[in-house]
Image (tube, rainbow, N blue to C red):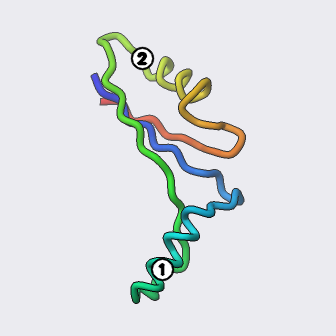
């Protein structure tokens, strides 16, 4: 079984990496980009019987800094 976790900075948290990407895209001539938010995707290969609640606990304890990041879990 696989799970995919999408982690992003919460709205209102400054994203210096996203801003650097936005600036670089502008320097390359892509002027239509008004904002960039950068996150991470974590793919987990899980043993049978691992529940979404287990993956949520992993996110809460390690995979996401829940003070400044939000996450979304996809099972399947």
- Point 42% across, 17% down: residue: 51
Tell me if residue 42 comes above or below residue 44 in the rendering. Answer: below
To which residue does mark 1 refer? 33
Q: Indicate whether 21 appears above or below 38.
A: below
Where, quadrant-wise, is the N terminus in this rendering? Answer: top left
For label 1, count other residues whose C-alpha is less than 10 Å away and answer few (under 14), some (14-19) or many (20+).
few
Residue at the image point whose x is 55% and y is 73% from the top: 35
Specify the quadrant of the image occupied by residue 61.
top right
Disc ID at residue 21: none
Residues marked 1 and 2 touching at CB (< 8 Å) = no
Q: For residue 49, what is the image quadrant?
A: top left
* Mark nearer the N terminus (1 vs 2): 1
Q: Is 63 placed above or below 57 here?
A: below
Q: Residues within 10 Å of mark 2 (few under 14, many from 20)?
A: some
x and y percentages locating residue 17 in the rendered image: 56, 62
Q: CA distance from mark 1 to mark 2?
A: 38 Å
Spot occupied by residue 50 in the image (x, y as percentages of width and height): 39, 14
Q: Residue at x 51, y 58 (%)?
A: 38
Q: Residue 30 appears in which quarter of the rendering?
A: bottom left
Horizontal and vertical percent position of residue 13: 70, 57
Point 61% across, 27% down: residue:
60
Q: Which residue was labeled with disc 2?
A: 51
- Residue 31 screen position, x and y as percent: 46, 88
- From what the image shows, is residue 28 above or below residue 62? below
Task: Tell me the SS state at disc 1.
Answer: loop
SS assignment at label 2: loop
Q: Nearer the viewer, residue 54 or 31?
A: 31
Q: Quadrant of the C terminus?
A: top left
């Amino acid at each position: 079984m696989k799970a995919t976790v999408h982690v992003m900075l919460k709205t209102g948290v400054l994203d210096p990496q996203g801003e650097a990407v936005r600036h670089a895209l502008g320097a390359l001539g892509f002027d239509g980009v008004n904002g960039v938010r950068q996150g991470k995707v974590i793919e987990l290969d899980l043993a049978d019987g691992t529940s979404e609640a287990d993956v949520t606990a992993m996110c809460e304890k390690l995979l996401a800094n829940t003070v400044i990041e939000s996450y979304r879990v996809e099972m399947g």
